[in-house]
Image (cartoon, coloured by chain):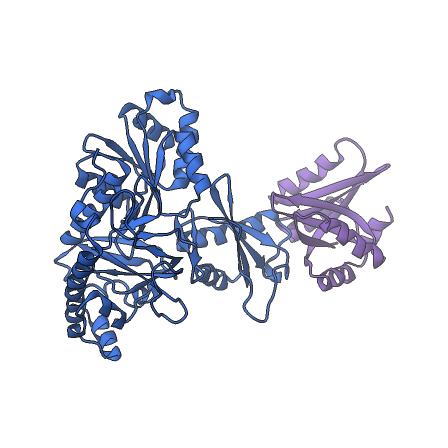
Chain colours: A purple, B blue
Amino acid sequence: MLIKQLSIFLENKKGRFTEVTNLLGEAGINMTAFTVAENSDFGIVRLVVTEPEKARDILRENRYAVSVTDVICIQMPNTPGALAKVMNIINDAGVSVEYMYAFSTGKSAAAVIRPDNLGITLEVLTNNKVDLLASDELFSL
Amino acid sequence: MNRIWNETMECMSRDDMRKLQGIRLRKAVERVYNCCEPYRKRMQEKGVEPGDIKSIDDIVKLPFTSKKDLRDYYPFGLLCSPMTDIVRLQASSGTTGKPIVVGYTRGDLDIWGEVGARCFTAYGIQKQDVVQISYGYGLFTGGLGAHCAVETIGGTVLPMSSGNTEKQIMLMHDFGAVGLACTPSYALYLAEALHNSPYPRDEFKLKIGAFGAEPWTEGMRKDLEEKLNIKAYDIYGLTEIIGPGVGYECEFQHGTHLCEDHFYPEIIDPETGEPLPPGQLGELVFSTITKEGMPLLRFRTRDLTSLNYEKCECGRTAVRMGKILGRSDDMLIIRGVNVFPSQVESVICELPQLEPHYLLLVDRVNNLDTFEIQVEVKEEFYSDEVAKMLDIRKRIVHRLQSVLGISPDVRLVEPRSIERSQGKAKRVIDKRKFQ
């Protein structure tokens, strides 16, 4: 089960991310998770939202560079060792993680993963009965 | 101490100088007409023959040459000597990927040594002095030009080239260098290194700086003189004409004396090409009237300045060129390197990841040039991974570096954030102040 993630290229300029949040807020789009990868000149904001296509179109209309990437979202108990178990499965399959970000709510935790091989990752996670979330499930967490 | 190397030439009466220039010009015109087809054709098109050149005043009958000619006849089309007589090639960056090449005969190298000796003698360098040459050695005329100047005087050359700053300071100290020849920005860098070195200032013998190859201000001169505790002089030159040695400042520093018995200067209106009266601001044009290998007649430098024919307090009658106040084209000199926006444009247009829009930002921070190029990546090349974006940037920097000869800071900006314009877009912002 794959989720669509938006990636937005932003220059390191004051107010740029604020504008993104305003645009999405006004369009009634909700964010579930996001992360920022940055260096001295620019940042890449990656986010999971309700209605990713609509969000992409709105951002593009407003001249943002947006790309849509498939990612996997796993759900696990918010307990020690839970993530380790998942990581071992991925690692043993010979897959590398390009990037990931995670969040927890009470008893449950979720992680968005971008592996270098989506197919194999999906297969090994499914075979090992790891819970994968669809985007609507992600929003009900 | 005598500060004039060649009194006959540097202090000649204006009338005698014009006569001499006329004789030399006639010979030069004959040479290019007989030895170089592009010149002959150009003169025939204008209806001029060598016999029409009777005095220096007739120079206005001759056609102009430009950087474009050097590019069109790259590499050896403008040589007037066979390769058997060419003993040296030097080059500088051109307007496109190809450099500007100049060939020197042995006689040309002697002229280069002679004019260079005039410069360094005016600065106060004598036979017994060690001169540290920290201009880059190689195709760039700076290093080898200053080198043969000091050798001609009979001084002691310390051929350091640029880089390896710690060693520069150590040898400057240990060998007792009296003179330092390099770009003003490298001199500032060395000044800081000297300050941070373990050697006290009074153990150095340094007292004279010969700086050039890039524009510098009076503020920068003061700064250098204070930090290095020296007297700083400008040395002027262009690769196309010969390299450093075309002109120099004397101890009074009221303009740059030109070696006009070798390089005849004119000031023209850059729009019409008509000569302007003495003292008026216009475009500087040089004719090399003694060179053999690659003489250039009426070469348009694109530098805007004026000429002063009054006798100088130093005793020289050699014409003085004022400060260069700008360019009549869009060439920039960044860290001593000639950069044309068209070069940047050609690189950006050939890279598939980039939109054909860019902005070039030049500034001077702490007396060093900063050089930033902003580019937009095409929509489909924006990635969710920072590493991929940085890889694109690295490729752009690498390509620009190989074409320009200097490394810019490349900044990836958001799509459509660079101004689009129907007419001539503003592609260059140069915040440096040279006046």
- Examine the rendering and report whether any part of residue A132 can be seen: no
x then y, percent, for residue B22: 18, 63
Of A1 and B216, the residue lying toward us: B216
In the displayed structure image, the side of residue B384 where residue B83 appears, left or right: left
B202 shown above or below B26: above
Determine the residue positioned at 66% across, 44% down.
Answer: A37
The N terminus of chain B sits in image quarter: top left
Rendering quarter of residue A2:
bottom right
Q: What residue is drawn where x is 58% and y is 53%? A: B412
Residue at 39% in and 66% down: B270
Q: Image height check: is B99 above or below B209?
A: below
The location of residue B204, given as percent across then percent down, is 33, 24
Taking depth in this image into account, of B230 and B197 the one nearest to the observer is: B230
Residue B316 in percent (x, y) is at 24, 46
Farthest left residue in view: B84
Marks counted in the figure total 0
Residue nearest the observer in this picture, B242 or A2: B242
Q: Which of A64 and B183 is in front in this view?
A: B183
In percent of the image, x 24 and y 56: which residue is there?
B263
Q: Where is residue B370 in the image (x, y as percent from the top left)?
A: 50, 46
Can the viewer see residue B55 in this picture?
yes
**Position of residue B95 in the picture relative to residue A28 (left or right):** left
